Amino acid sequence: MQAGVKKLFVKSYGCQMNAYDAARMADVLAPEGYAETGVIEDADLIVLNTCHIREKAADKVFSELGKVRMLKEAREAAGLTTTIAVAGCVAQAEGAEILRKQRAVDLVVGPQSYHRLPEMLRQAALGPVIDTDFPVEDKFDHLAQPSEEKIRQRGVTAFLTVQEGCDKFCAFCVVPYTRGAETSRPAGKILAEAERLARAGVREITLLGQNVNGYHGEGEGGKDWSLADLLTRLSKVEGLARQRYMTSHPNDMSEDLIRAHAELPSLMPFLHLPVQSGSDRILDAMNRRHTAADYVRLVERIRRARPDIALSSDFIVGFPGETEADFVATLELAREITFGSTFFFKYSSRPGTPGADLEDQVAEEIKSERLGRLQEVVETQRRSFNSALVGRTIDVLFEKKGRYPGQIAGKSPYLQPVQVDGPETLIGQIAPVEIVECSSNSLFGRLAESFSQAQPTREAN
Ligand code: 5AD
Ligand code: SF4
């Protein structure tokens, strides 16, 4: 190994916030002499950034750790040391158990403590360390910022965490326990981070939070800002052409946020607004604190504000006590709303959540059968949403080279991947594209004739 240069491999599971955290962990380790590698065998430090949301995700960590232990042993035989760190929500929930179950692990760090990684690494040289506290200091105040070059390498779209934790306590969800109480970052710090990203060529930011539309951070003059205030301010940052936010709770879709969808051209017409179930009885048991009709009315208000908006949702099937009639109500709600895209999950009982203690757990076969039926409905919706774009011209933000030489790839306002024949010089630009074809996951198009590279684009101006 070359003296002074250490290699870091981070593998991230689960949500976008974990992806953001993975980048920030790399940022905090860069001044310590760690450079990222995509080759796990070369890594002096392996970080598994884990997800605890469903049992399957959590189980993955232990099988992955088995593989990583073998790698550590192989490297050891070659005279190389490897440090293994487990980060993220499994670390938070099962920290001590991880160290007990897998002795190859040197370090366990919860999502609120990764700013302490450098210090923890020094301690790990002497023996296993664990930090799953919810520290009083704000980790964001202690994190190194990425270099401009690093931001450029990461591409023209970026995540930015603005809010963390959740106070809603939905009966199925581990988030209030793994990420803690809701906290919002001060608007000034978010703005500074967004400006830095924009200066390094980022054109689109997605504001992240477990309950992002509950954002209420300190704004200018010490006054609390809502997410709408924050989006409005960020829409003025030079270079940032597109904004998104996720994930939202229906009960926090405030009037000013709905208005922001009407007023801010940079706010993309695509909203992830999970409803989870269409049955009032199950929504109540889930502690969602709204009915299916409330959700329908809310969607109507949002669509009135921004008629071209597309919605996406998460659904859970087989929550304890869910009957066939409850499930049919979910199918009906999905049909009534018509989603552009949807995520659907079988209920997974999570230790420590109220749902885990409920009687009437639904059998696995019934969950699978319902998942299949829901999938059929929402997949049909997704396909018809995609195919309705064929023949239309939409703005695409180009992000990278495409699948084949001469192609470039980008995203539509609705987050669909779009492949186009075009020059790489368009990467980082937004251009109108006429959609000519669609497959199940992607759109294919050609640059609109009216488009000339020299002209400012519609969204970008
Ligand atoms: N089982 C199944 N799905 C879950 N989700 C959260 N907790 C569970 C669970 N215990 C789903 C919800 C949430 C998404 C991120 O994951 O639909 O919106
Ligand atoms: Fe979990 Fe979202 Fe409910 Fe919070 S609002 S408890 S993060 S599902």
Image: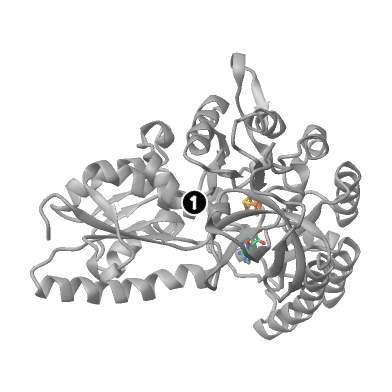
- List the residue tagged with mark 1: 155
Q: Is residue 388 left or right of residue 25?
A: right
Q: Residue at x 71, y 66 (%)?
A: 445
Q: Is residue 16 above or below residue 189?
A: below
* Label 1, residues with CA under 10 Å away: few <14, some 14-19, many ≥20: some
Please give left or right for residue 80 compared with residue 445 in the image.
Answer: left
Q: Is residue 62 left or right of residue 276?
A: left
**Quick one: quadrant of the C terminus?**
top right
How many discs appear?
1
Q: Decide which of 416, 74 is in the foreground and name it.
A: 416
Residue 203 x %, y %:
58, 43
Percent of width and height locating residue 357:
62, 64
Whether residue 119 can be seen here: no
> Quick check: 50 above or below 235?
below
Quadrant containing the N terminus is: bottom left
Whole-percent x, y for residue 57 in the image: 50, 69
Comparing 172 with 460, the one in front is 460
Tell me if residue 377 comes above or below residue 250 in the rendering.
below
Tell me what residue is drawn at x 33 percent, y 71 percent. Answer: 65
Of residue 78 and residue 369, the one placed in the foreground of this image is 78
> Can residue 455 be seen?
yes
Q: Quadrant of ligand 1?
A: bottom right
